[in-house]
Image (cartoon, helix red, strand yellow):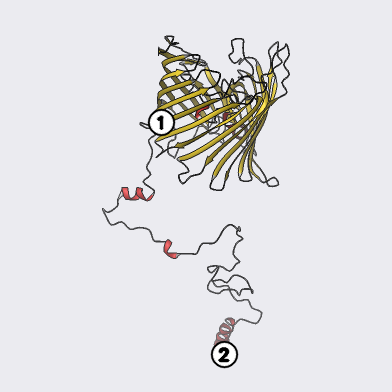
């Protein structure tokens, strides 16, 4: 009986290892499922039992090369070469940048870990206070012949930023220029027929002073629940900069709020932001001037909105604003709009096109129009074999009637057209007419940055009036300009500028200057 039971047990064990016709074959890593006709073979898919992934028609698979994957290096004792390891990454090392003159709380751009913050407004929006003071000191010696005035001078300007960072998204910021007042700078005039001695200017009034933060982050801290949105905002004496500074480059008392990081699959927009802004004091526009000819920054309110969008291989920026003349006599209010499109075309051309228009101004009290017209600005640069350092450019413009920026000081629409259209914000360096009023022209030049430690710019520029209602330009203007700047240390830069301008029906202009800038 015991022998019979033993035989039955052995038979059961043997039979249990033979699959039936309905049994499933256990999956094994070395067993490949059959492939359908026309499907990728396991060998083509490197042993994976699936079809190849979808791939864009512009992409191509790269053949697998096992030799590209090597084991980690082994360094015998005493043979590790630090310099050789750095050379693997192009010899890149940490760059010692100028330190802020004041760093309280923690260092600017310090390495991690940064440590925990303080739970004052909620554990989801920790406070990590940091107080920084930084900026630069600019001093220049120049000899400028403006046609109507000729003088040699040495002038100085101090730019001082005070930044109080509270959380990762909230801060208070102020900017001071204590050695100048408006367009007048601390200086000593020493030569020229119109030199007037010297002047020491001290000004403690802030140029900007504002709070900025994110309402979503603040809500998360106060409620201890993550907000489903981001809503950055700012208020105070706020600087705003739109259309690369051509349309708006001003600081005024008011505020702004943005709806960020949206997209639209339907419109093929990968990312877009919308910013709304308003200002109620210290709004500057060259369309509103006082009796002495200076810009009247206490006479206007401003309202507007701007759209930024990345779409169809380029960047779109479009804005609308209204400047309200609040003076008793009034009448110089106007609407303003600007649209810009920036894109690279192949590996040949980088291009920006901007259209700025002013309209709807209806002067009363027999005042003349100061903001009515449009300007088309086109900036082009060639993409060379040294795309980051060698940049030939050709910028052109055409303006009709009296186009104006929405909010900017005494600089015109052509500020970025070329170096011949920009002054230095220090010595009153000469420039060509930059209003774009009833004129066309442009700048042709080349910029070369060498090894990023120095730069040379050479340029030929012209302004050609074609008549109309504007009398801003008396005749043709042409200039040759040059610039050279050299880094002396990480904190010190020296710069040379020169211009010779020829003007019909007006005195010629010329200037030469050297500037030393110390960053801190």
Seen from the viewer's position, the closer of residues 245 and 14 is: 245
Instruction: Say if 476 sits above or below 21 in the image.
Output: above
Residue underneath mark 2: 4
Give me the residue at 63% from left, 72% from top: 38
Q: How many C-alpha atoms fall within 10 Å of the one at disc 2: few (<14), some, or many (≥20)?
A: few
Front-most of 132 and 248?
A: 248
Q: Residue furthest left?
A: 78
One can see residue 91 in this view: yes
Tell which circle, 1 or 2, labels the residue nearer the N-terminal end.
Answer: 2
On the rendered image, what quadrant is the C terminus found in?
top left
Q: Secondary structure at mark 1?
A: strand
Question: Hey, which quadrant is residue 75 in on the image?
Answer: bottom left
Neighbourhood count class around disc 1 (C-alpha, 10 Å): few under 14, some 14–19, many 20 upward: some
The reply to whether residue 134 is in sight is: no
Dot 1 and dot 2 residues touching (CB under 8 Å):
no
Percent from the top left, x then y, of residue 344? 57, 44
Quadrant (top left/top right/bottom left/bottom right) for the N terminus: bottom right
Question: Residue 327: percent from the left, percent from the top?
Answer: 68, 12
Q: Residue at x 53, y 22 (%)?
A: 503
Please state if 16 lies on the left or on the right of 499 as rendered.
right
> In the rendered image, which residue does mark 1 sit on?
485
Instruction: Determine the image quadrant of residue 7.
Output: bottom right
Q: CA distance from mark 1 to mark 2?
A: 104 Å
What secondary structure is found at the residue carrying circle 2? helix
The quadrant where residue 2 appears: bottom right
Q: Position of residue 47 (x, y in %)?
A: 53, 69
Please say if 83 is above or below 34. Answer: above
């Amino acid at each position: 009986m015991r022998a019979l039971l033993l035989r039955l047990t052995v038979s059961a064990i043997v039979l249990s290892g033979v699959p039936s016709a309905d049994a499933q074959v256990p999956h094994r890593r070395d067993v490949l499922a059959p492939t359908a006709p026309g499907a990728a073979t396991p060998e083509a898919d490197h042993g994976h039992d699936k079809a190849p992934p979808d791939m864009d028609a512009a992409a191509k698979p790269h053949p697998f090369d096992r030799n590209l994957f090597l084991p980690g290096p082994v360094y015998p004792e005493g043979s590790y070469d630090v310099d050789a390891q750095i050379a693997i990454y192009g010899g890149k090392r940490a760059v010692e940048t100028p330190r802020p003159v004041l760093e309280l709380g923690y260092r600017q751009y310090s390495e991690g870990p940064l440590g925990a913050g303080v739970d004052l407004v909620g554990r989801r929006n920790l406070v990590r206070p940091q107080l920084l003071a930084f900026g630069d000191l600019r001093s220049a010696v120049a000899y400028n012949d403006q046609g109507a005035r000729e003088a040699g001078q040495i002038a100085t300007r101090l730019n001082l930023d005070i930044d109080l960072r509270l959380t990762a998204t909230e801060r208070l910021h102020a900017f001071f220029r204590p050695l100048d007042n408006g367009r007048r700078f601390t200086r000593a005039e020493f030569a020229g027929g119109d030199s007037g001695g010297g002047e020491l200017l001290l000004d403690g009034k802030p140029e900007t002073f504002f709070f900025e933060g994110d309402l979503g982050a603040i809500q998360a801290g106060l409620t201890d629940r993550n907000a489903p949105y981001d809503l950055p905002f700012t208020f105070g004496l706020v600087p705003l900069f739109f259309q690369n500074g051509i349309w708006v480059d001003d600081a005024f008392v008011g505020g702004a709020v943005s709806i960020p990081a949206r997209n639209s699959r339907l419109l093929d927009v990968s990312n877009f932001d919308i910013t709304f802004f308003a200002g109620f004091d210290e709004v500057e526009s060259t369309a509103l001037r006082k009796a002495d000819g200076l810009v009247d920054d206490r006479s206007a309110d401003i309202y507007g909105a701007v759209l930024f969008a990345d779409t169809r291989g380029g960047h779109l920026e479009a804005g609308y604003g209204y400047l309200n003349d609040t003076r008793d006599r009034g009448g110089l209010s106007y609407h303003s709009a600007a649209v810009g499109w920036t894109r690279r075309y192949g590996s040949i051309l980088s291009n920006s096109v901007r259209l700025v228009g002013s309209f709807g101004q209806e002067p009363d009290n027999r005042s003349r129009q100061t903001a009515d017209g449009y300007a088309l600005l086109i900036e082009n640069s060639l993409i060379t074999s040294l795309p980051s350092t060698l940049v030939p450019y050709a910028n052109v413009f055409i303006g009709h009637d009296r186009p104006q920026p929405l909010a900017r000081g005494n600089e015109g629409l052509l500020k970025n057209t070329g170096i011949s259209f920009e002054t230095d914000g220090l010595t009153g360096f000469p420039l060509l007419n930059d209003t774009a009023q009833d004129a066309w022209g442009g700048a042709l030049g080349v910029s070369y940055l060498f090894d990023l430690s120095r730069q040379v710019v050479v340029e030929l520029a012209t302004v050609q009036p074609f008549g109309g209602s504007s009398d801003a330009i008396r005749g043709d203007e042409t200039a040759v300009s040059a610039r050279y700047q050299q880094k002396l240390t990480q904190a010190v830069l020296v710069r040379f500028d020169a211009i010779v301008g020829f003007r019909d029906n007006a005195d010629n202009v010329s200037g030469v200057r050297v500037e030393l800038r110390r960053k801190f």
